[in-house]
């Protein structure tokens, strides 16, 4: 059983910053290797979209809408991925979900954390 626990969401004014964290843990076995780690988001009435991706080697990719404002990073020793969000806009309001693909174990999702940006 693998669990992804997100934290760091909340309410912020436009132009502000938030830092999301997502830690992976497992029962009954050690997490030896996590491949891709990602952040997705889903706004009300919209489809879930990929926000940022980071490979096990640290290669990153971003949605055009967040380039230059968001930074994804990871700490492999802690099995944790982060999303630093700066210059937030009201259109960034959404539930943010963490995703991790574990070697030989498959893909897992976090429960989601709400980010609300007021104008």
Image: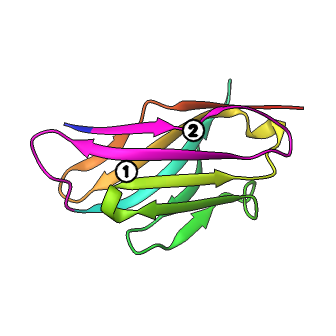
Camera-nearest residue between 28 and 101: 28
* Spot occupied by residue 60 in the image (x, y as percentages of width and height): 55, 69
**Quadrant assignment for the N terminus:** top left
Seen as rendered, the residue at the extreme top is 45
Q: Secondary structure at mark 1?
A: strand
Please tell me whether residue 43 is drawn above or below residue 35 in the rendered image.
Answer: above
Quarter location, residue 88: top right
Q: Is residue 45 part of the magenta span, yes or no?
A: no
State left or right for residue 71 relative to residue 75: right
At 53% from the left and 48% from the top, the residue drawn is: 39
The reply to whether dot 2 and dot 1 touch (C-beta < 8 Å) is no
Seen as rendered, the residue at the extreme right is 119
At 40% from the left and 75% from the top, the residue drawn is: 57
Categorize mark 1 by other alpha carbons within 10 Å: few (<14), some (14-19), many (20+). many
Name the residue that disc number 2 marks: 8
Q: What kind of secondary structure does the magenta stretch mostly adopt?
A: strand
Please tell me whether residue 113 is drawn above or below residue 36 in the rendered image.
Answer: above
Please tell me whether residue 34 is drawn above or below residue 3 in the rendered image.
Answer: below
Mark toward the start of the polypeptide (2 vs 1): 2
Task: Please give the range of residues in magenta.
Answer: 3-32
At 27% from the left and 44% from the top, the residue drawn is: 25
Name the residue that disc number 1 marks: 100
Categorize mark 2 by other alpha carbons within 10 Å: few (<14), some (14-19), many (20+). some
């Amino acid at each position: 059983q693998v669990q992804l626990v997100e934290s760091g969401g909340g309410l912020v004014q436009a132009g502000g910053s938030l830092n999301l964290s997502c830690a992976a843990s497992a029962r009954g076995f050690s997490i030896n290797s996590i491949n891709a780690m990602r952040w997705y988001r889903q706004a009300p009435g919209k489809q879930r979209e990929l926000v940022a991706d980071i490979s096990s080697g640290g290669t990153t990719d971003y949605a055009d809408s967040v380039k230059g404002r968001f930074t994804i990073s990871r700490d492999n020793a802690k099995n944790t991925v982060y999303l630093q969000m700066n210059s937030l806009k009201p259109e960034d309001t959404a539930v943010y979900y963490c995703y991790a693909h574990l070697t030989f174990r498959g893909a897992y999702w976090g429960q989601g954390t709400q980010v609300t940006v007021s104008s």
